[in-house]
């Protein structure tokens, strides 16, 4: 069963670490995902699988929030440039691509979550 408190903790830690990560582009953002996933996995506990799952969800939640903002921006700017069709295709296209990238980038959160879940036991 999913511990949504652990997912939320991991999400918040990832966001805060991501803000700090702007000082170290690239390395910092991977580290932010690992730290956020570790927090989610550690709070959830339950071993490798549970930590992996909670870390993955915390990273995906952050990615989905970013994808919503990207999709909204694509809708607004697509509407300004291409009218209604540009708004539809610009917003939805960007949103779908951002969701795919979010789930791929959530894998580092899942790895951190697995480590946190194992350490807590």
Image (tube, rainbow, N blue to C red):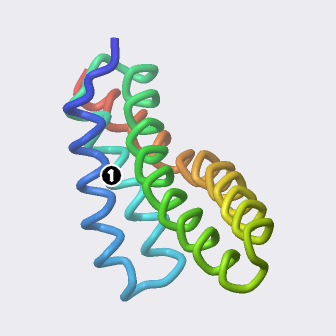
Q: Is residue 32 above or below residue 109?
A: below
Q: Which part of the image, by quadrant, shows the C terminus?
A: top left
Q: Is residue 26 left or right of residue 23?
A: right
Residue depicted at x 49% and y 42%: 111
Horizontal side of 66 relative to 54 (left or right) equals right
Mark 1 packing: few (<14 Cα in 10 Å), some, or many (20+)? many
Q: 53 or 77: nearer the eye?
A: 77
Residue 46 placed where, x, y %?
30, 17
- Write down the quadrant of residue 32 in the picture: bottom left
Residue 85, compared with residue 106, is above or below; it is: below
Q: Is residue 62 above or below residue 29?
A: above
Residue 79 drawn above or below residue 64: below
Residue 38 place in picture, x, y as percent? 32, 44
Label 1 sits on residue: 36
Residue 47 locus on image (x, y percent): 35, 19
Residue ID at (75%, 59%) = 93
- x, y percent for residue 59: 44, 47
Horizontal side of residue 68 vs 44, given as left or right:
right
| Residue at x-position 43% and y-position 55% | 65
User: Number of labelled discs?
Assistant: 1
Nearer to me, 83 or 99: 83
Please tell me whether mark 1 sits on a helix, a strand or a loop. helix
């Amino acid at each position: 069963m999913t511990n949504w408190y652990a997912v939320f903790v991991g999400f918040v830690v990832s966001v805060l670490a991501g803000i700090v990560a702007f000082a170290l582009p690239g390395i910092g953002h991977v580290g932010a995902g690992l730290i956020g996933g570790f927090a989610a996995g550690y709070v959830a506990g339950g071993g490798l699988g549970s930590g992996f799952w909670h870390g993955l969800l915390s990273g995906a939640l952050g990615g989905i929030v970013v994808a919503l903002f990207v999709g909204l921006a694509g809708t607004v700017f697509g509407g300004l440039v291409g009218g209604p069709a540009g708004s539809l295709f610009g917003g939805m296209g960007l949103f779908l691509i951002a969701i795919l990238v979010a789930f791929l980038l959530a894998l580092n959160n899942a790895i951190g979550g697995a480590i946190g879940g194992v350490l807590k036991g």
